[in-house]
């Protein structure tokens, strides 16, 4: 599985339909902006003295982060469909709300996210490295659960995590290096004060979607 090929396909799909992806990811961009604004808010006390209050728990590490994460997961489901040529490049705002429009997607994402976090945290208590390895192992669980739901198959949240661990066997390092390869892009987002995110965010999610789909194909060909 070539990183170059994974990224090339993601880039081709994105650049061919950039307006569509811009609109589909628009809620994510808006949440990011609102989160940044509310991180550090200036108010005045009764004596007119400026006081800086950090709203971090409601920002990127709080409510905005949770909502953004849920929406992003739903959008990634759509990205997987695009990788498979199973979705039309229309109704971007409807696709943005994928996680909200399907209760099984929503609750699956919530509970798998919670379980993955707990399991990863417990491994991290031993050592940092095992925690990182397990987070990589569990990274495909939500997508596996979603595919099972679409096929009408019964799968528990723990089963999805187990299947992810099995699917990622021998591929965790590949996924880790794939994510590292985006560091330059993420730095560019910071340098451009977020402007580059209009390209980088969908590019990254499409690449991850392509990685997952490619993993399944490798598994099928064994």
Image (cartoon, helix red, strand yellow):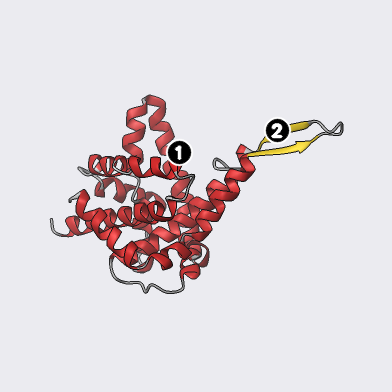
Place residue 186 in its image quadrant.
top left
Q: As drawn, is 160 to the left or to the right of 72?
A: left
**Residue 210 or residue 31, whichever sits in front:** 31
Please give the residue where the numbered disc 1 appears in the rendered image: 118
Please give the residue where the numbered disc 2 appears in the rendered image: 52
- Picture coordinates of residue 194, whole percent (x, y): 48, 47
Q: Residue at x 45, y 38 (%)?
A: 118
Is the residue under label 1 in contact with that under label 2 (CB below 8 Å)? no
Q: Residue at x 49, y 54 (%)?
A: 70
Q: Residue at x 28, y 67 (%)?
A: 84
**Residue 56 or residue 130, whichever sits in front:** 56
Vertical comparison of 202 with 97: above or below: above
Q: As drawn, is 146 to the left or to the right of 172?
A: right
Q: For mark 1, does the 10 Å Cα neighbourhood hold few (<14), some (14 to 19), or many (20 or more) residues?
A: few
Q: Nearer the viewer, mark 2 or mark 1?
A: 2
Vertical comparison of 127 with 171: above or below: above
Secondary element at image label 2: strand
Vertical comparison of 216 with 94: above or below: above
Q: For mark 2, does the 10 Å Cα neighbourhood hold few (<14), some (14 to 19), or many (20 or more) residues?
A: few
- Picture coordinates of residue 148, whole percent (x, y): 35, 62
Secondary element at image label 1: helix
Q: Residue at x 36, y 25 (%)?
A: 127
Inspect this view and state whether residue 215 appears: no
- Picture coordinates of residue 23, whole percent (x, y): 47, 65
């Amino acid at each position: 599985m070539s990183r170059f090929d994974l990224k090339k396909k993601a880039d081709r799909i994105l650049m061919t339909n950039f307006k569509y992806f811009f609109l589909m990811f628009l809620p994510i961009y808006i949440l990011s902006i609102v989160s940044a604004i509310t991180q550090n808010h200036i108010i005045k006390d009764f004596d007119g003295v400026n006081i800086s209050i950090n709203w971090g728990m409601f920002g990127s590490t709080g409510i905005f982060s949770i909502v953004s994460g849920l929406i992003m997961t739903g959008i990634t489901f759509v990205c997987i469909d695009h990788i498979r040529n199973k979705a039309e490049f229309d109704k971007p705002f409807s696709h943005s709300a994928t996680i909200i429009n399907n209760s099984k997607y929503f609750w699956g994402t919530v509970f798998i996210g919670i379980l993955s976090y707990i399991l990863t945290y417990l491994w991290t208590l031993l050592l940092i490295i095992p925690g990182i390895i397990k987070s990589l192992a569990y990274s495909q669980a939500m997508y596996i659960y979603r595919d099972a739901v679409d096929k009408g198959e019964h799968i528990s949240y723990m089963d999805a995590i187990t299947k992810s661990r099995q699917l990622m066997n021998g591929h965790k390092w590949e996924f880790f290096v794939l994510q590292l390869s985006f560091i330059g892009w993420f730095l560019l987002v910071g340098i451009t004060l977020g402007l580059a995110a209009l390209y980088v965010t969908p590019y990254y999610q499409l690449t991850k979607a392509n990685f997952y789909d490619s993993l399944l194909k490798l598994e099928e060909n064994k």
